[in-house]
Every structure is written in C-alpha cells, then in structure tokens.
Image: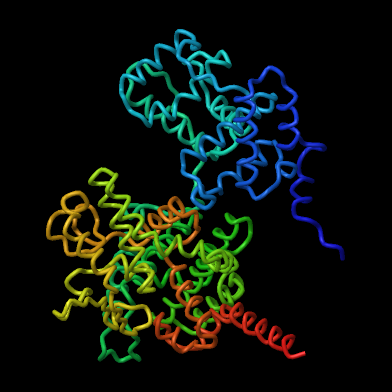
Amino acid sequence: MKSIDPKAIEMAALPKGPLTFADIIMKLHGDASLSDLRRRDLVSGLRRVAKALGRAPEETVANTRWLQPRLSQVAPAAIGLTEKSWQNAVSDARSALMHVGIVGPRRRHTDVLQEPWRELWQKVHALQDRHLTAGLGRFIHFLNNLGVLPGDVTQAHADAFLQAIRAEEIVRRPEVSWRNAVNAWNTAVSRIDGFPGPRLALPKRANVIKLPDNELPPAFLADLDALMQRLAAPDPFADDAPMPALAASTIKQRTRMLKRFASELLVAGVPKAEIDSVAALCAPDLARKGLQAMVARNDNRSSVVIDNMAEILLACARRLNLTSDIQDGLGGLARRVALPTQRGMTRKNRDRLRVLRDHATLLRLLELPEKLCAAGRKLKPSEAALAREDALAIAILLVCPLRIGNIAGIHIERHIQRPGDGRAFLVFAEDEVKNGRPMEFELPPDVRRMLDKHLAHRSPMLCPAGTPWLFPRRDGTGSVDPSTLSTRLKERIRKETGIAANAHLFRHLAAMLYLEDNPGAYEAVRRLLGHSAVSNTISLYTGLETRAVFDVYGDVLTARKGNK
C-alpha cells in the first residue's frame, strides 16, 4: 500500500485551500502601505517561525489552531535563539497574520474601556499584583468589547472567551491563558470590594477520585497503617513464611493507591461499613466494582494506574494470606486490565535519546552545569543559588546515573564520603537502592568543586544554615520531593538547551554512550546502573549500540572498495 505523507494528513484536517506563510509573504510584498522596514520585520517573523517548525513557508499553515500545538513545543534554545528573540519573531508573525485579517488586533488600552470596566480595572491595578493584571487584562477587554456589564458576567461568557483566544492566539496554549484569566477573576471577586460575581468554574484537570483521610472509614485507615508497618518491618519469627521488607517508597505508593481505591468504592456507592480493612478491598466483588469504575472513567480502557491498582490488590491478598479463591479472583481481574508488557525503552525515550546522538546537541547538555554556574553572576542571589543547585543536580546525574529518588535524598554527611585525600564519593547502602545493590561513584574534580562552592553559598537563600540535605526543602526539614526536583530539572534543561530530558533519561543516556563505545558490554552497563540481572539490561538497551555497529560495517565496506 502506498504510504501517506504525514504533512498531507495534517492538511486534510484543515479547510480546503488554507493560506500558508508563503501566501502571506506574497501579500506583504504587494502591499504598498507598508514601509520597507515594517515589511522586512513581518516577513522575517514569518520565515523564522516557519524555520523553527522545520518547514518551508509554503508548508506552514496560517491557521491559529494548526499553529498553536506546534509552536507550544518550540524551545528557543534548541534553535539558537534567546527567549526574547523568539518572542519578537512570534510577535512579528502574529502581526503579519493580523495585517492580512487572519487574527484580530489586541486592544489593551485602558481608555477604550467603558466606565464600569475602567473603574474595576483601576481597582485591580491598585493591588499591584502582577498575576491579577496579567490574567484579567484580556478577559476584561473581551467582556468590554462584547458590551457585557460587570454585573451580567456568566459562565457562558468565560467559555466564549476560551473560544476567542483559541482563534486569536498562535503560540501560548489557549487553555493556560483561559485558566489564568478565570483564576484571576475569582481572586478579584474575593479580594476587591465591589468586584462583581459570580465565581467562575474551571474543569478539573485530573481524572482522579481521592477523598481526604477524614472522609475514609477510620477502621480502614487503622488497618492500612498497621499493615504497612508490618510490611516495612516484617517479623522474622512469624509462623508464616517471612517476606522481605518493602522499601519506604513502595510503602508510600501502596498507601496512596489503597486510599484511592477505597475512595473509588465509596464514590461508587459502597457503604463505609463494608470498607473496614485492606482485606475488604481485596474481596473480588468489591475489587471488580472499583476497577470497573476506574476503567469507565478512562473511556473504557485500562491504564498504567489501573494495571498497577489490580496488581497491588493481588499483592495485598498474598501478603494477608487470603484464601486461594480470593487470590484467583483478583488474578483474573488483574489479567483483564493488564497492559502489554513493555519491552525495552518506550518510543518517547528512544526519540529523546536519538536527539542526543548529535554531538552539538549532546554538548549543550554536558556543558549545561558550567553554563548555569557562570550565568549565576548576573542573577539575584536567590536565583543564582537555585541555578547552582540545579546545575549540581544535573552534573551529578551526568556522572552518577542514579534514580531521581536517590539523587533527591542525598544526605551530605551520610551519602557524601570524603576519605581525606581530596576525593569525594557518593555512596548508597544496599537498603537505599531499589535493587538492593550498593552503589558508589567518585565525583570528578569539577563536580566536587561545584559541590563545595554551592554548599558554601546556598544559605540562607535556599535553606537554613546547617541543613544536612544536599537538595533540601526550603525550610530545611527534609529533602526535596523527587517529583518536584525532577520537574524542575526537566523545565530548566528545556529552557536552557531546548532538549526534552527528564531525570530518568540520564540513566538511558549513560547506557547509550557506554554501549556506543563498547558494543555488547551489557554486564558493565548493568553494574553502572545497578540492575539486578543482566537480562534486564539487555532487554532494555538492546539496539542502542546499533550506530557503532553500522559505523564499523561502513568501514568494512570502505575497506573492501579500497581492495578492488
């Protein structure tokens, strides 16, 4: 069957004959009302935006809904532009679209507001809250242009505003702008005397049922807590076969998931009296009801969360030594919602690694820690300290490809060992690592210097003096949450380099770089990453050294040609 050009599919979803950037450029060149300088700026904006999308102007559609999702994925650093230069390019492109009538002008001047709105806008400005003014500005002008009086605003007007910015905005995600506007409106209602209601509604982002603890049955909570304590520290002299202790992270995850499942059952109409223990959740009829509710809310499809929930219920039944009938029933439910086993890396991670095969792109990531530390000289002290903290985390991930939970939980006295000869080691004991394998890395001199400088200057901007955690909460009471640190690093890397990389990708990167230089060295990679079995390493990373193999094969062909 003949393959279909993906770009042709994109075009097929649009109205027949959509204008392209090339069409607009032609119109601009034929418009005598434009000065040469203004025409140059508008055309330049269109060409730069098209180039950022990897397209020729003839392939770039001048349609806001087509542009929005694509431009929202552009990272200026990836195309060699600063944030300001990219904003200027997009602004010029939007002005070009406005000039030919595709989008309307932005009317932001206070003097165009009718008196009721002008008075309210002055009250908003008086609070000197940048989030309020930024969020409310376009919404208030939109309502003013509609001729709606402040006291007549309804939810329908808010929903119409979302449709309007979808038609007018080409780079920012319209839903984000809309949420900011509605949140700012609700804040103004509560903070400003005389600001009219009503409070406006936003749809919930998460499709999750999770009741607070005070709405869950006390007997269930007590039983859950007792079970988790036993699983965290099992009795080695118990009559039944002893099981290994669960890691603290596993205890936390299972506690959260079981509370969520109890919430699912309560919302589904199960009486509280029936949910008096973890064993009650494992009853096949209740388990089926809860899993069916989750599947129905997910468009009648399973998901990773649903798959995990079924497996956790089955694991609890085994830990509680429930009857074989119960375990068999839960096993059947688990099979019904089970997802196909992931073999190797996900496509998303392979795509992200493929970008890093380019030497220049990889170099941007490798040099990022030094870049962030150098940039700190131009920042405020608190911003510089945060940049150094991010730089240190990235530098450690590059040389010590550990899981983000271990990185986030680094204790300066326990995990950083200094033998007294100038060297420093990052050390984790068996019970601190997922697979029960002790891990030890020597920090290179540049990372060690970065560490010492950061520790000398981080207080009091980031934490109280004497805080023992390398990546602490700001009050110094503990280490930062791993997901918080991971999200922060992901955003920092994308902003500074344009590379899409989460914290776990550093482990895949370490495997890729090592295997490219040492094809087939899976045992070494297993040790580097702390896998429990080399078969896991082979399953995950088979094929990463393919480029090295192809290079060798290319050399073989070249040599054969030379021998003819």
In the picture, the quarter occupied by the N terminus is bottom right
Q: How is the image coloured?
A: rainbow
Q: Position of residue 460 (x, y in %)?
A: 16, 50
Say if 533 sits above or below 387 in the image. below
- Between 496 and 194, the residue placed more toward the observer is 496
- Between 108 and 195, the residue placed more toward the observer is 108
Say if 310 sits above or below 543 in the image. above
Say if 460 sits above or below 146 in the image. below
**Which quarter of the picture shows residue 373?**
bottom left
Which residue is at 34% across, 70% downward? 249
Residue situated furthest right in the rendering: 1
- Between 139 and 457, the residue placed more toward the observer is 457
Say if 220 sits above or below 31 in the image. below
Q: Position of residue 140 (x, y in %)?
A: 48, 21
Residue 261 visible in the shown view: no
Q: Position of residue 159 (x, y in %)?
A: 57, 30
Horizontal side of residue 235 vs 18, given as left or right: left
Residue situated furthest top in the rendering: 115
Residue 539 visible in the shown view: yes
In the picture, the quarter occupied by the C terminus is bottom right
Q: Position of residue 366 (x, y in %)?
A: 41, 65
**Which quarter of the picture shows residue 115?**
top left
Which residue is at 41% across, 80% downward? 529
- Between 301 and 191, the residue placed more toward the observer is 191
